[in-house]
Image: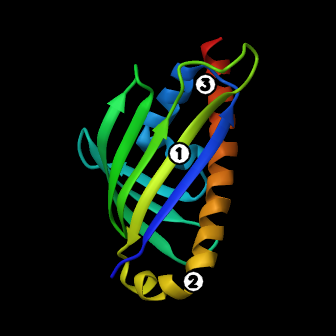
Amino acid sequence: MSRVYSFTHRWRVDAPRDVVFDVLRDGEGYPRWWPQFRRAVALDASSGVAEIRGALPYRLRLVVTREVEDRAAGILRVTLSGGLRGYAEFSIPGAPPRPGDPLVLSYRQEVVVTARGLRSLAPILGPILRANHAAMMRSGEQGLRKACSEACSAES
């Protein structure tokens, strides 16, 4: 039986909602701002291949397929297959709770490890995999802040 890994994170970004949405919807751009994304290449208008490597000496190859892209609702959701099977989703609120506060977006992910070598070790490495994921998410949040800041500067 495969174990489902569920993750939730909150990211704080000091940028307009549309800028955040546009940076996140550009799948091929992830390697520019999220260091663990080593490669991201489009296959067609709604899917692509991403190669991800965190602190562990293991590279995951994922096929990422857009499931939901709803700017009005602030939802970006993809299905994942390949080394992981499941989904990842960003939810971006309409506006910060108070003027001057950062935008707080949510990230949710539910996956099953399907990569052969990693799948057999996942029950033993669970805490290490979670720590690796947490470090990757911290790096992603920092990178998103920087990418949004640069996008805002380019618009000025």
Q: Amino acid at mark 3?
A: Ala
Amino acid tagged 2: Leu
Q: Residue at x 28, y 47 (%)?
A: 47
Label 2 or label 3, whichever comes before in sequence order = 2
Would you say 77 lies left or right of 138 here?
A: left
Q: Which mark is residue 141?
A: none
Sort mark 2 into few (<14), some (14-19) or many (20+) by Cα contacts within 10 Å: few
Residue that carries the numbered disc 1 in the rendered image: 107
**Amino acid under disc 1:** Tyr
In this figure, which residue is indicated by the disc labeled 3? Answer: 151
Location of residue 68 (image quadrant): top left
Q: Which mark is residue 125?
A: 2
Question: Which residue is at a point 65% across and 23% down the rendered structure image?
Answer: 15
Q: Position of residue 63 (x, y in %)?
A: 32, 58
- In the structure shown, which secondary structural element does the residue marked by tag 1 occupy? strand
In front of the other: label 2 or label 3?
A: 2
